[in-house]
């Protein structure tokens, strides 16, 4: 018996495309290592939440290394994002868009 609402996860590439459009970057930018760039952490956050992926899956998908590295990056990002109102607004906007996409997909079934 499921207590949570279970739905089909979104396609990981579609999730990255939506985030890339929001930030004005190419999808491949999420696979690149860059110092002090939040792109990977944002992708990780939404791939886990909306793509139905585990930390290990995300690590393999984004070519990060390990699930542990994903976990560390997420926790570091959460600390920084909590301090930035602009980042929080941007994350909320992306989340709303992804929720709409997921709801639209669920209603088409």
Image (cartoon, rainbow, N blue to C red):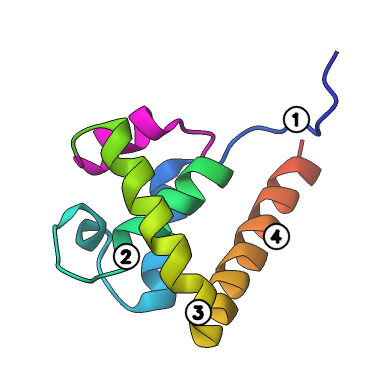
Between tags 4 and 3, which lies in front? 3
Q: Residue at position x 75%, y 41% from top? A: 106
The residues bearing labels 2 and 1 have C-alpha atoms spaced at a distance of 27 Å
Q: Does residue 70 lie above or below 15 as drawn? A: above
> Does residue 58 appear left or right of residue 102 in this picture?
left
Q: What residue is pinned by disc 3?
A: 83
The residues bearing labels 3 and 2 have C-alpha atoms spaced at a distance of 17 Å
Q: Quadrant of residue 2?
A: top right
Between tags 2 and 1, which lies in front? 2
Q: What residue is pinned by disc 2?
A: 39
Outermost residue on the top side: it is 1
Q: Earlier in the sequence, mark 4 or mark 1?
A: 1
Q: Residue at position x 59%, y 81% from top? A: 89
Q: Residue at position x 33%, y 47% from top? A: 72
The residues bearing labels 4 and 1 have C-alpha atoms spaced at a distance of 16 Å
Between tags 3 and 2, which lies in front? 3
List x then y, in percent, for residue 42: 41, 60
Q: What residue is pinned by disc 1?
A: 6
The residues bearing labels 4 and 3 have C-alpha atoms spaced at a distance of 27 Å
List x then y, in percent, for residue 47: 46, 45
Evaluate if marks 4 and 1 touch, with contact meaning CB atoms under 8 Å apart. no
Q: Earlier in the sequence, mark 2 or mark 1?
A: 1
List x then y, in percent, for residue 88: 56, 76
């Amino acid at each position: 018996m499921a207590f949570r609402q279970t739905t089909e996860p979104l396609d990981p590439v579609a999730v990255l495309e939506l985030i890339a459009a929001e930030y004005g970057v190419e999808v491949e930018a999420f696979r690149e290592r860059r110092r002090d760039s939040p792109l990977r952490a944002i992708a990780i956050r939404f791939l886990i939440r909306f793509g139905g992926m585990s930390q290990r899956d995300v690590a393999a998908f984004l070519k990060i290394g390990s699930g542990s590295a994903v976990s560390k990056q997420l926790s570091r990002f959460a600390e920084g994002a909590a301090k930035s109102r602009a980042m929080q607004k941007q994350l909320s906007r992306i989340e709303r868009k992804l929720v709409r996409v997921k709801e639209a997909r669920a209603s088409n079934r």
